[in-house]
Amino acid sequence: GQQLNQSPQSMFIQEGEDVSMNCTSSSIFNTWLWYKQEPGEGPVLLIALYKAGELTSNGRLTAQFGITRKDSFLNISASIPSDVGIYFCAGGFLIQGGSEKLVFGKGTKLTVNP
Amino acid sequence: DVKVTQSSRYLVKRTGEKVFLECVQDMDHENMFWYRQDPGLGLRLIYFSYDVKMKEKGDIPEGYSVSREKKERFSLILESASTNQTSMYLCASSSLGDEQFFGPGTRLTVL
Protein backbone atom coordinates (compact mmCIF):
# COMPACT_ATOMS: atom_id res chain seq x y z
CA GLY A 1 0.00 0.00 0.00
CA GLN A 2 0.93 3.67 -0.12
CA GLN A 3 3.53 4.91 2.32
CA LEU A 4 4.83 8.36 3.13
CA ASN A 5 8.37 9.13 4.24
CA GLN A 6 8.35 12.23 6.40
CA SER A 7 11.55 13.95 7.46
CA PRO A 8 13.05 14.97 9.68
CA GLN A 9 11.65 12.96 12.57
CA SER A 10 12.42 15.74 15.02
CA MET A 11 13.85 19.26 15.05
CA PHE A 12 15.25 21.43 17.82
CA ILE A 13 15.49 25.06 16.80
CA GLN A 14 15.86 28.52 18.29
CA GLU A 15 13.00 31.00 18.26
CA GLY A 16 13.12 33.09 15.10
CA GLU A 17 14.64 30.38 12.91
CA ASP A 18 12.95 29.05 9.80
CA VAL A 19 11.85 25.42 9.62
CA SER A 20 11.47 23.08 6.69
CA MET A 21 10.05 19.57 6.60
CA ASN A 22 8.96 17.33 3.76
CA CYS A 23 7.17 14.18 2.73
CA THR A 24 7.91 11.89 -0.17
CA SER A 25 6.26 8.83 -1.59
CA SER A 26 6.53 6.42 -4.47
CA SER A 27 2.76 6.83 -4.94
CA ILE A 28 0.81 9.65 -6.58
CA PHE A 29 -1.72 11.58 -4.49
CA ASN A 30 -4.64 13.82 -5.40
CA THR A 31 -4.21 16.07 -2.40
CA TRP A 32 -1.59 16.87 0.20
CA LEU A 33 -2.51 18.04 3.66
CA TRP A 34 -0.45 19.30 6.57
CA TYR A 35 -1.72 18.92 10.14
CA LYS A 36 -0.34 20.03 13.51
CA GLN A 37 -0.97 18.10 16.71
CA GLU A 38 -0.38 19.46 20.19
CA PRO A 39 -0.07 17.18 23.24
CA GLY A 40 -3.35 15.55 24.21
CA GLU A 41 -5.24 16.96 21.23
CA GLY A 42 -6.30 15.76 17.81
CA PRO A 43 -4.54 16.95 14.63
CA VAL A 44 -5.61 20.36 13.34
CA LEU A 45 -5.49 21.12 9.63
CA LEU A 46 -2.95 23.80 8.67
CA ILE A 47 -2.85 23.76 4.89
CA ALA A 48 -4.59 21.77 2.16
CA LEU A 49 -3.13 21.46 -1.36
CA TYR A 50 -5.21 20.29 -4.31
CA LYS A 51 -3.15 20.78 -7.48
CA ALA A 52 0.31 19.67 -8.55
CA GLY A 53 2.70 22.60 -8.28
CA GLU A 54 0.38 24.55 -5.99
CA LEU A 55 2.10 26.81 -3.47
CA THR A 56 -0.08 27.96 -0.58
CA SER A 57 0.57 30.15 2.43
CA ASN A 58 -1.22 30.46 5.75
CA GLY A 59 0.43 33.21 7.79
CA ARG A 60 4.02 32.13 8.48
CA LEU A 61 3.38 28.70 6.95
CA THR A 62 4.00 27.85 3.31
CA ALA A 63 3.43 24.48 1.69
CA GLN A 64 3.82 23.14 -1.81
CA PHE A 65 2.30 20.23 -3.71
CA GLY A 66 5.15 18.67 -5.67
CA ILE A 67 4.92 18.75 -9.43
CA THR A 68 5.22 14.94 -9.62
CA ARG A 69 2.36 14.63 -7.09
CA LYS A 70 4.62 12.39 -5.02
CA ASP A 71 5.93 14.91 -2.51
CA SER A 72 5.20 18.02 -0.49
CA PHE A 73 7.04 20.36 1.81
CA LEU A 74 6.05 22.66 4.66
CA ASN A 75 8.05 25.73 5.68
CA ILE A 76 7.55 27.74 8.86
CA SER A 77 9.20 31.14 8.92
CA ALA A 78 10.35 33.02 12.02
CA SER A 79 9.36 30.27 14.45
CA ILE A 80 7.79 31.12 17.81
CA PRO A 81 7.41 28.99 20.95
CA SER A 82 3.76 28.15 20.20
CA ASP A 83 4.88 26.40 17.01
CA VAL A 84 5.92 23.39 19.11
CA GLY A 85 4.05 20.22 18.32
CA ILE A 86 4.04 17.32 15.92
CA TYR A 87 3.49 18.10 12.25
CA PHE A 88 1.98 15.44 10.01
CA CYS A 89 1.76 15.30 6.27
CA ALA A 90 -1.05 13.34 4.67
CA GLY A 91 -1.54 12.27 1.08
CA GLY A 92 -5.11 11.84 -0.13
CA PHE A 93 -6.45 9.58 -2.85
CA LEU A 94 -9.98 9.03 -4.06
CA ILE A 95 -11.90 5.90 -3.24
CA GLN A 96 -15.42 4.74 -3.96
CA GLY A 97 -18.25 7.24 -3.96
CA GLY A 98 -15.91 10.19 -4.30
CA SER A 99 -14.63 9.87 -0.75
CA GLU A 100 -10.98 10.48 0.00
CA LYS A 101 -8.70 8.24 2.02
CA LEU A 102 -5.60 9.65 3.70
CA VAL A 103 -2.19 8.14 4.24
CA PHE A 104 -0.19 9.82 7.00
CA GLY A 105 3.50 10.39 7.51
CA LYS A 106 4.94 9.48 10.90
CA GLY A 107 5.30 13.09 11.94
CA THR A 108 7.98 15.70 12.63
CA LYS A 109 8.29 16.72 16.26
CA LEU A 110 9.23 20.39 16.51
CA THR A 111 10.78 21.94 19.62
CA VAL A 112 11.38 25.69 19.72
CA ASN A 113 13.75 27.10 22.32
CA PRO A 114 12.89 30.65 23.39
CA ASP B 1 -16.49 25.82 12.55
CA VAL B 2 -16.52 22.07 12.11
CA LYS B 3 -16.90 20.30 15.40
CA VAL B 4 -16.01 16.67 15.95
CA THR B 5 -16.52 15.44 19.49
CA GLN B 6 -15.53 12.18 21.13
CA SER B 7 -17.35 10.78 24.13
CA SER B 8 -14.34 10.41 26.42
CA ARG B 9 -10.88 11.97 26.57
CA TYR B 10 -9.50 9.19 28.79
CA LEU B 11 -10.75 5.66 29.31
CA VAL B 12 -9.39 2.75 31.34
CA LYS B 13 -10.76 -0.73 30.71
CA ARG B 14 -9.86 -4.28 31.63
CA THR B 15 -8.83 -7.06 29.27
CA GLY B 16 -11.87 -8.80 27.83
CA GLU B 17 -14.28 -5.89 28.35
CA LYS B 18 -16.44 -4.62 25.52
CA VAL B 19 -15.56 -1.00 24.79
CA PHE B 20 -17.56 1.62 22.89
CA LEU B 21 -15.96 4.80 21.59
CA GLU B 22 -18.41 7.36 20.29
CA CYS B 23 -17.84 10.15 17.79
CA VAL B 24 -20.26 12.87 16.76
CA GLN B 25 -19.87 15.54 14.07
CA ASP B 26 -22.14 18.53 13.56
CA MET B 27 -21.39 19.45 9.95
CA ASP B 28 -23.53 16.92 8.09
CA HIS B 29 -20.42 15.23 6.71
CA GLU B 30 -20.87 12.09 4.65
CA ASN B 31 -17.59 10.48 5.63
CA MET B 32 -16.37 9.46 9.06
CA PHE B 33 -13.15 7.72 10.05
CA TRP B 34 -11.55 5.99 13.01
CA TYR B 35 -7.76 5.99 13.43
CA ARG B 36 -5.41 4.84 16.11
CA GLN B 37 -2.20 6.67 16.84
CA ASP B 38 0.84 5.02 18.38
CA PRO B 39 4.34 6.43 18.95
CA GLY B 40 6.57 5.87 15.95
CA LEU B 41 3.72 4.50 13.84
CA GLY B 42 1.73 7.64 13.10
CA LEU B 43 -2.00 7.47 12.36
CA ARG B 44 -3.39 4.22 11.03
CA LEU B 45 -6.90 3.84 9.64
CA ILE B 46 -9.08 1.28 11.38
CA TYR B 47 -12.48 1.71 9.67
CA PHE B 48 -14.32 4.35 7.74
CA SER B 49 -17.86 5.02 6.62
CA TYR B 50 -19.03 7.01 3.60
CA ASP B 51 -22.73 6.83 4.38
CA VAL B 52 -25.20 5.76 7.03
CA LYS B 53 -25.05 2.01 7.65
CA MET B 54 -22.06 1.73 5.29
CA LYS B 55 -18.63 0.73 6.55
CA GLU B 56 -15.32 -0.17 5.01
CA LYS B 57 -12.24 -1.75 6.54
CA GLY B 58 -9.16 0.38 6.82
CA ASP B 59 -5.59 -0.83 7.21
CA ILE B 60 -5.88 -2.41 10.67
CA PRO B 61 -9.51 -3.55 11.28
CA GLU B 62 -8.71 -6.70 13.24
CA GLY B 63 -10.21 -6.68 16.73
CA TYR B 64 -12.54 -3.77 15.94
CA SER B 65 -16.02 -3.22 14.55
CA VAL B 66 -18.00 -0.05 13.84
CA SER B 67 -21.56 1.16 13.69
CA ARG B 68 -23.11 4.08 11.84
CA GLU B 69 -26.85 4.21 12.43
CA LYS B 70 -27.10 7.98 12.08
CA LYS B 71 -25.18 10.32 9.80
CA GLU B 72 -23.69 12.36 12.62
CA ARG B 73 -22.53 9.45 14.79
CA PHE B 74 -19.85 6.83 14.22
CA SER B 75 -19.05 4.29 16.92
CA LEU B 76 -15.93 2.16 17.30
CA ILE B 77 -16.40 -1.11 19.18
CA LEU B 78 -13.76 -3.29 20.77
CA GLU B 79 -15.60 -6.58 21.28
CA SER B 80 -13.05 -7.93 23.75
CA ALA B 81 -10.38 -5.39 24.65
CA SER B 82 -6.77 -6.50 24.75
CA THR B 83 -3.67 -4.78 26.08
CA ASN B 84 -2.31 -4.24 22.56
CA GLN B 85 -5.32 -2.01 21.91
CA THR B 86 -4.02 0.56 24.38
CA SER B 87 -3.67 3.61 22.18
CA MET B 88 -4.90 7.06 21.25
CA TYR B 89 -8.06 6.79 19.13
CA LEU B 90 -8.92 9.62 16.78
CA CYS B 91 -12.17 10.18 14.95
CA ALA B 92 -12.39 12.36 11.83
CA SER B 93 -15.09 13.47 9.43
CA SER B 94 -15.14 15.00 5.97
CA SER B 95 -17.45 16.08 3.23
CA LEU B 96 -17.09 14.46 -0.21
CA GLY B 97 -13.65 15.26 -1.66
CA ASP B 98 -12.87 17.62 1.22
CA GLU B 99 -10.25 17.57 3.94
CA GLN B 100 -10.71 15.58 7.18
CA PHE B 101 -11.35 17.28 10.50
CA PHE B 102 -10.35 15.51 13.68
CA GLY B 103 -11.80 15.18 17.15
CA PRO B 104 -9.68 15.64 20.29
CA GLY B 105 -8.97 11.94 20.69
CA THR B 106 -9.66 9.28 23.30
CA ARG B 107 -6.69 7.86 25.14
CA LEU B 108 -7.64 4.25 25.93
CA THR B 109 -5.69 2.13 28.40
CA VAL B 110 -6.46 -1.57 28.61
CA LEU B 111 -5.15 -3.23 31.78
Image (spheres, helix red, strand yellow):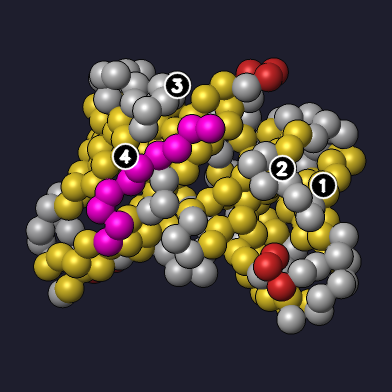
Asked whether A37 or A4 is in front, the reply is: A4
Say which residue appears at 67% left-offset and 39% top-offset.
B58
Amino acid at dot 4: Cys
Rendered position, A29 above or below B58:
above
Quadrant assignment, res A45: top left
In magenta segment, residue B70: no
Residue identified by numbered label 4: A23
Q: Earlier in the sequence, mark 3 or mark 4?
A: 4
Percent coordinates x, y for residue A29 in the rendering: 43, 24
Percent coordinates x, y for residue B48 in the rendering: 71, 38
Residue identified by numbered label 2: B47
Magenta highlight range = A1-10
Disc 3 secondary structure class: loop
Alpha-carbon span between mark 4 and mark 1: 31 Å
Dominant SS in magenta: loop
Residue identified by numbered label 3: A30
User: What mark, if any, has residue B66 been given in the picture?
Assistant: 1
Q: Are marks 2 and 3 on the same chain?
A: no
Disc 4: CA contacts within 10 A as few (<14), some (14-19) or many (>=20): many
Asked whether B78 or A57 is in front, the reply is: B78
Q: Chain for mark 1?
A: B
Disc 1: CA contacts within 10 A as few (<14), some (14-19) or many (>=20): many
Say which residue appears at 30% left-offset and 57% top-offset.
A9
Q: Is residue A44 left or right of residue B71?
A: left
Alpha-carbon span between mark 4 and mark 2: 24 Å
Rendered position, A31 above or below B55:
above
